Every structure is written in C-alpha cells, then in structure tokens.
Image: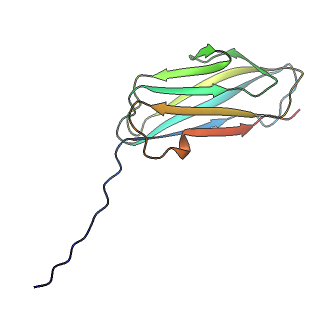
Amino acid sequence: PPTTTTTVPPVAKGADLRVGMETPLSVAPGSTVSAKIVVTSLGPADSGVTRTFYVAPAGYTIVNAGGGGLFFGIDIFTANNITAGQTVTYTVTLKARGDLGLGFHAVYTAGSTADPVFWNDVAFNPAATI
C-alpha cells in the first residue's frame, strides 16, 4: 500500500527575550526624566543569566543607574535568570543637559540560553525634543 511521510518542523528551543522601553517625548534642559526598560522572557525556556545594556542619547547624563552598573557610560543590568513568562523592569534616571541633540535611547538584551528570535532583543527610541 502507498505511504505518506509528513515532516514536522522542530519546536524552537531556547528563551525568546523581548526588550522594550518607555522614554519621554519632550523634555526641558536641566530636567530629570526616566527611561523605563522592560525585558520579558517569551519562553519556552528560562533565559539563564541575562544582561541588558542601555545607552542614553547625546545630551543626557545617567544620574541613577537603577540597579545597573555604569561602564563607560553604558548602564548594564544583570538578572540571574528570567523564567518563561516573567518580566523584569529597570528604571534609569537621566538629567537632560542644555546640549540636547538628535539621537536615540538604545537598549539590548541577551541571555545565556540561546535566543531563537533575535530581532526583538534590541530597541531604539528617539531622543526627546525640547
């Protein structure tokens, strides 16, 4: 009798991390504002040790790293593990200087478990206008 063979694609393994952020749309020079960074593990696996890197645009100074550590102006956060379905939020406090210019807030995250979807591991928001 004839037979039919069906190939089922493998289930993606790893920890799909997604990062996003909220930043102000306008700001006055000299004011203090916040950048809220949100990292979510979409699973199916836990992320393992996860590092998140935030870079402020030109014209801003990080005045409170929000639990991260500053290294050459980059705010680096470490989570020992983000379980599937869990969200971790970081808040960075910034001071807007008088020399605000064009630029972007940038954030990137990576875990020690392989990430099958890499395009959602980075986010950019435009710098606020005066």
Give the x, y percent position of residue 104.
74, 35
Number of callouts: 0
Give the x, y percent position of residue 91.
62, 24
Q: In the image, what residue occupies the spot 68% across and 17% down?
A: 73
Q: Height in image: 53 above or below 118?
A: above
Instruction: Name the colour scheme.
Output: rainbow
Pick whichever, 68 or 13, lies toward us.
13
Looking at the rendering, in which quadrant would you find the N terminus?
Answer: bottom left
Give the x, y percent position of residue 63.
71, 14
Pick whichever, 92 or 51, lies toward us.
51
Q: In the image, what residue occupies the spot 86% across and 27% down?
A: 100
Q: In the image, what residue occupies the spot 62% across and 32% down?
A: 107
Q: Which quadrant of the view contains residue 105?
A: top right
Looking at the rendering, in which quadrant would you find the C terminus?
Answer: top right
Q: Height in image: 42 above or below 28?
A: below
Q: Height in image: 93 above or below 12?
A: above
